[in-house]
Image (cartoon, rainbow, N blue to C red):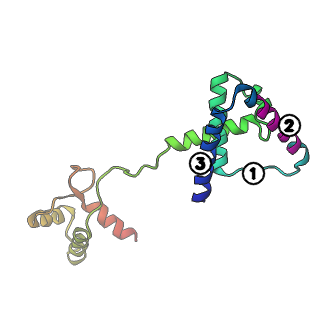
């Protein structure tokens, strides 16, 4: 897939370079020849054409650039975009732009998870001392130098004893 994308990019760039060296009359003739070939292809081809993602990307970007440059509507693009519906090509471009601006949220925020050492100590204290409440477990941790809280609703830098014990009970 990577080689296909790389080949497609270089082919497109090479086409841009070749178009630059043509005169306007040569470009017009080439466009007419290509349109004739496409109309023949449309008449003869029975199955729908399924372009790859890279081809959709290229066609969508070029069509949108052309539409902005010439200020044409989607209906006016029907004479230029022949294999697919212009609305489809413009939708490909919209999906491309939407994908570009939707990044996965890597940092969900909130407090970092409790270390396994602290969690195992909380569970051991609760198991060995069944009558010990959240407050006494917090006190034991403070004696050892760990900062913990009764619940996570307390200060943001403290750990939640209640959440650890509730998580253990639900397992």
- Please name which of the two marks, 2 or 1, marks the residue nearer to the observer: 2
Is disc 1 in contact with disc 3, using a CB cutoff of under 8 Å?
no
Q: Which residue is mark 2?
A: 36
For the view shown, which residue lies furthest in the left direction? 143
91 left or right of 42 in image? left
Rendered image: mark on residue 10: 3
Query: Is residue 35 shown in magenta?
Result: yes
* CA separation in Å, label 2 and label 1: 21 Å
Q: Residue at x 10, y 67 (%)?
A: 144
**Label total for image:** 3
- Which x, y percent locates residue 1? 60, 59
- Which x, y percent locates residue 69? 63, 24
- Quarter of the image for residue 79 reads top right
* In the depicted structure, whether residue 2 falls above or below residue 127: above
Q: Secondary structure at mark 1?
A: loop
Q: Secondary structure at mark 2?
A: helix
Q: Which residue is mark 1?
A: 50
For the view shown, which residue lies furthest in the right direction? 44
* CA separation in Å, label 1 and label 3: 21 Å
Please report whichever mark, 2 or 1, sits nearer to the chain's N-terminal start.
2
Span of residues in magenta? 28-41
* CA separation in Å, label 2 and label 3: 26 Å
Point out the image quarter for the C terminus. bottom left
* In the depicted structure, whether residue 88 falls above or below residue 52: above
Please report whichever mark, 1 or 3, sits nearer to the chain's N-terminal start.
3
Q: Secondary structure at mark 3?
A: helix
Q: Residue at x 66, y 45 (%)?
A: 56
């Amino acid at each position: 897939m990577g080689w296909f994308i790389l080949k497609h990019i270089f082919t497109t760039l090479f086409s841009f370079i070749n178009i630059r060296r043509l005169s306007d009359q040569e470009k017009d003739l080439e466009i007419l020849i290509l349109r004739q070939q496409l109309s023949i292809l449309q008449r003869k081809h029975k199955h729908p054409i399924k372009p790859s993602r890279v081809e959709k990307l290229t066609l969508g970007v070029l069509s949108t650039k052309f539409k902005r440059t010439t200020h044409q509507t989607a209906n006016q693009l029907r004479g230029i975009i022949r294999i697919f519906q212009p609305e489809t090509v413009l939708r490909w471009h919209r999906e491309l732009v939407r994908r570009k601006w939707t990044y996965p949220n890597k940092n969900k925020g909130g407090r970092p998870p409790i270390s396994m050492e602290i969690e195992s100590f909380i569970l051991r204290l609760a198991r060995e001392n069944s009558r010990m409440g959240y407050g006494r477990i917090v006190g034991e941790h403070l004696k050892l130098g760990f900062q913990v809280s009764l619940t996570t609703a307390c200060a943001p830098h403290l750990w939640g004893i209640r959440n650890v014990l509730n998580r253990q009970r639900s397992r």
